[in-house]
Image: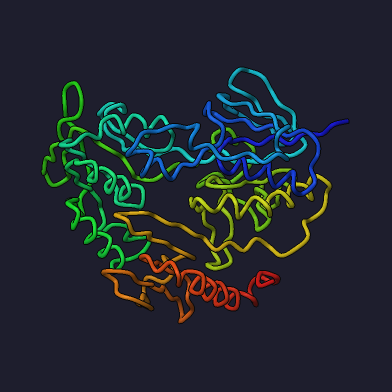
């Protein structure tokens, strides 16, 4: 009798999951269910090149390996519920799919501000359709207000000002990316944006978006009104876990998993289920804490381990090999400079040092906890990247070798 694995989510995480499941030896049925009508496509360009030049989902689509040609894709379909004990998922058309194994790769949705203004007045960027709608409005002279100075907000700001828009970024913290990279690097990111004409309203929040037939102004908490033809919300994300409610899982911030990426129910792993990508919250040995990491590289890093864990769980045993040891990696292209982050800089905000170069041109910035390198941010410095990343990995592995057996393997 043929067996089946159902993958919920047709983004990068879902694609990498089916590739790795085939690579790990699963020859039976694989079906991927995705809400969007598109095959998996590359999302980072949605805030950069595609936002500037126009969005073509087919051009952004990932190449699918020959080993996955027989995978069934149910696109434009949403999983609304799951029964982990009966091993079924329910679809929005009323149908059901039975599974022997389940991959939760359902990703995230854009967090939205609790404002009275209609949602269609306020852009978010998560899908190709989102980026297309915003691209249509980024015209020279347009007054753009971006709420949120994280990486997404900063990338949209750089793209918009490059298209001739007047751009103001509203951020409740004192510098962009303060929680992620701290005031030193955040201040340098602000300087670079201001050098290109972006304005910031820092330490401020939005209380209203005003207008009649569309936005005309954004009202800040201290009373300032910012003229606005276009409003963009870049205020984080919400994990898509509603379909897993009622199954005894911890869904407070994504799907809580163990080191093998199995969801936990009453403290015990559910062996025939794994979570991959933005939706998974799992232990990161570098910090000793639980994290949900929305970095582009993470699904690729996770998928191989998740595939081995799932196939072992279906057979009723633990996977072989060391536990999952990720080194979170992120990059952002702004004004012709690649900004790269490795590890977890937020763990070392009390000890930040410029390790190489000049902060205002190209540099390597190190973040330390108890003298151990736990994170890096590079402005340019591409030739030095591999050596510094290796140094980070070696120090992190040495620091946790006694805490997580096998992690340094």
Residue appearing at x 71%, y 65% in the figure: 322
- Looking at the image, the residue that sits furthest to the bottom is 371
Residue appearing at x 30%, y 50% in the figure: 154
Query: In the figure, 53 relative to 358: above or below?
Result: above
The reply to whether residue 245 is in sight is no
Query: In the figure, 323 relative to 397: above or below?
Result: above
Of 331 and 91, the residue lying toward us: 331
Of 209 and 340, the residue lying toward us: 340
Query: Which of the 4 image quarters holds residue 203?
Result: bottom left
Of 130 and 241, the residue lying toward us: 130
Q: Is residue 110 left or right of residue 134?
A: right
Residue 231 in the image, given as x and y percentages of width and height: 24, 36
Query: Which of the 4 image quarters holds residue 100?
Result: top right
Residue 56 in the image, given as x and y percentages of width and height: 44, 32
Q: Is residue 100 left or right of residue 281?
A: right
Residue appearing at x 49%, y 79% in the figure: 372
Query: Which of the 4 image quarters holds residue 409?
Result: bottom right
The reply to whether residue 118 is in sight is yes
Residue appearing at x 60%, y 17% in the figure: 93
Q: Quadrant of the N terminus?
A: top right
């Amino acid at each position: 009798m043929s067996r089946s694995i159902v993958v919920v989510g047709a983004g990068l995480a879902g694609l990498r999951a089916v590739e790795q499941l085939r690579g790990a030896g699963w020859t039976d049925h694989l079906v991927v269910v995705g809400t969007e009508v598109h095959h998996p496509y590359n999302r980072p360009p949605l805030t950069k090149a595609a936002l500037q030049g126009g969005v073509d989902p087919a051009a952004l689509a990932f190449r699918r390996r020959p080993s996955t040609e027989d995978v069934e894709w149910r696109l434009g379909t949403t999983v609304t519920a799951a029964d982990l004990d009966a091993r079924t998922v329910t679809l929005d058309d009323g149908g059901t799919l039975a599974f022997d194994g389940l991959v939760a790769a359902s990703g995230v949705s854009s967090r939205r501000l609790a404002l009275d203004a209609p949602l269609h007045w306020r852009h978010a960027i998560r899908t190709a359709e989102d980026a297309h709608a915003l691209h249509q409005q980024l015209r020279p002279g347009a007054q753009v207000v971006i709420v949120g100075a994280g990486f997404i907000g900063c990338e949209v700001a750089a793209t918009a000002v490059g298209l001739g828009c007047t751009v103001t970024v509203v951020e409740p913290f004192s510098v962009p990316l303060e929680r992620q990279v701290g005031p030193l690097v955040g201040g340098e990111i602000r300087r670079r944006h201001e050098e290109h004409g972006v304005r910031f309203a820092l330490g401020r929040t939005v209380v209203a978006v005003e207008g009649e037939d569309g936005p005309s102004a954004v009202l800040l908490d201290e009373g300032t009104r910012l003229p606005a033809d276009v409003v963009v919300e870049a205020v984080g994300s919400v994990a898509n876990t509603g379909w897993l409610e009622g199954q005894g899982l911890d869904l407070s911030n994504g799907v809580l998993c163990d080191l093998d990426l199995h969801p936990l129910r009453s403290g015990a792993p559910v062996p025939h289920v794994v979570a991959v990508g933005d939706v998974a919250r799992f232990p990161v040995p570098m910090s000793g804490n639980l994290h949900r990491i929305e970095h582009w590289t993470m699904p690729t890093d996770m998928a191989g381990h998740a595939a081995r864990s799932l196939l072992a769980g279906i057979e009723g045993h633990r996977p072989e090999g060391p536990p999952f040891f990720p080194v979170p990696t992120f990059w952002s292209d702004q004004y012709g400079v690649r900004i790269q982050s490795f590890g977890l800089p937020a763990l070392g905000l009390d000890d930040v040092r410029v390790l190489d170069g000049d902060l205002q041109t190209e540099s390597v910035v190190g973040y330390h906890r108890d003298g151990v390198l736990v994170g890096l941010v590079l402005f340019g410095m591409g030739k030095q990247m591999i050596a510094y990343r290796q140094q980070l990995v070696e120090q992190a592995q040495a620091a946790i070798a006694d805490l997580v057996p096998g992690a340094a393997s």
